[in-house]
Image (cartoon, rainbow, N blue to C red):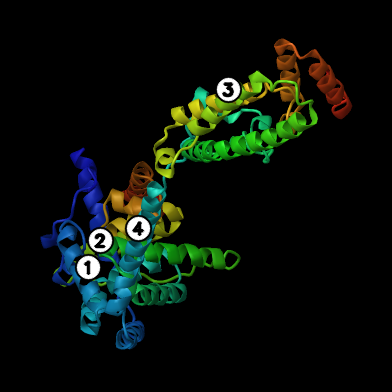
Amino acid sequence: MSNDRDQDKCVSETYRSLASEKTPQHLDRKILQMAAEQSKRPLYSRWMAWSRPLAWAATITLCLAIALELAREPSLEPLPAIPDDIAYELTVPESHYAAEPERGTVRGDLRKDEAAQLENEQSREMPAALADAIASEKTALARSAASQPTNEPPAPVYEVEEQKAKTSVEMFRYDDRSAAKMTTANAAAGVLEADMAIEEILVADDCPEIIQSDPETWLNCILNLEKAGDEESAERERDALIDTFPDFKMP
Amino acid sequence: MLSTYPSLMTGDLPLSRQAAVAYAPAMEHAPEDSALMLRYRDGDAAAFEILYRRHNDALYRYLLRLCRHPQNADDIFQEVWGKIIKAADRYRPTAKFTTYLYRVAHNCFIDYLRRNKRHTHVGDYDADSQPNPGESPETAVERSLARERLDIALQNLPDEQRDAFLLHEEAGLNLDEIASVTGANRETAKSRLRYAVNKLRVAIDEPAETS
């Protein structure tokens, strides 16, 4: 091992004695002149020296800003489902509401508070529709009463039912503040009571025009007439129902 | 540092050679070389001259023995320093300046070989040998013959082995630095250097066969 090292040292020493060349002077002059000319040119300025770190800082800042902006977006959570009671009320048939066929149904895409608000508005408007229905029914009954013989006593059932309808209308006379305070459950109760009032009105001799607009309610009116014993009126109304709604399947 | 190739005792060399040796205390020069280069980057031309004087001869000999043609060595020498000067604006002292310098030189030599594939010419140049003043005539003759044999053996080495040997001798690089300059791994650089030294040693030790 030491012999190898000595021989390696001998090789190195021999080479160093051999390698004694020097750089030609013309090369030295040329290169030093080139270096001097290059040093006179404006070197990397301080601003240029900061360009790379500034570029890095701008890139990192931009990436952070984008990441924070994406993190700040609200998460799109699914809307809560409509409770069953409201969903039931929202699917009340259109025939229960007067003049506006689209009333009684609420679009499925409405949110819960909008559905409740619409329900409240419909509840407030319902008494007006009921009042109109009762008014038109009164008119019709008055006409039929005038056409009837005078010795016939007035139908006692109508008077009782009229009183009941008046009571029903009064039940729905809410002021604005009460309507605003009414909860969704109360609105549903109001709708239910309106349905009951309509059923009470249907016990009259003839079915009013507003009832005749829907074949199902008309049929209910006819059945009520039959229950009340007025088979002639029921038969007459049944014939009119078949004529008006020929496609309607009678039970 | 090589485990089987000991460092030179700078005291054994003539004074003119000691300054050119960037060998055992290479790490002490490295910061100073980098500092000079940084000063040149900031506009100090005198700093570059100091740096140039420190490395020009060793680099020239490296290229001369690598190319085996003086004219080609001159061209590559100018190209190497031209690149160093132009890249001064972007210089960063991430490694030893010597490693950086000889990496550029090695790459320029590779480019030269690619450009002159069909025109590779091994020129004959006479190794300039100067006898030591205190030597006897017999010793001087023997030394001269040994140098000639070494020179011929060096020229006959494969390019990779010659390159490894010259990087070790002229630039004073260790195995890791030689591997970094040549783009090889440490074991490959070690084997190349070992083979080169063995062949040169045989050439020096067996004068009767080569004469």
**In this picture, is B139 found above or below A200?**
below
Q: Which residue is mark 3?
A: A196
Residue B139 visible in image: yes
Q: Residue under label 1, please give it.
A: B34
Which residue type does callout 3 highlight? Answer: Met
Subunit ID for the residue under disc 2: B
Element type at mark 2: loop
Residue A60: image tag? 4
Q: Residue B173: x and y, percent?
A: 27, 56
**Percent coordinates x, y for residue B129 in the rendering:** 29, 70
Q: Amino acid at mark 2?
A: Lys
- Amino acid at the residue labelled 4: Ile
Indicate the position of residue A105 as horizontal and vertical percent values: 62, 34
Which element carries disc 1, helix, strand or loop? helix
Residue B113 position, x and y percent, is: 52, 64
The residue drawn where x is 28% and y is 66% is B92
Tag 2: Cα neighbours inside 10 Å, few (<14), some, or many (≥20)?
Answer: some
- Which residue in the protein does label 2 denote? B96
Q: Secondary structure at mark 3?
A: helix
* Residue B103, picture quadrant: bottom left
In the foreground, A117 or B88? A117
Could you tell me how far apart the alpha carbons at marks 2 and 4 are, in whole angstroms? 32 Å
Circles 1, 2 touching at the beta carbon (< 8 Å): yes
Circle 3 or circle 4, nearest the eye:
3
Mark pair 4, 1: CA separation? 31 Å
Which callout, 3 or 2, points to the residue nearer the camera?
A: 3
Q: CA distance from mark 3 to mark 1?
A: 101 Å
Q: Amino acid at mark 1?
A: Ser
Residues tagged by mark 1 and mark 2 found on one chain of the structure: yes
Q: Residue at x 58, y 68 (%)?
A: B119
Helix, strand or loop at disc 4? helix
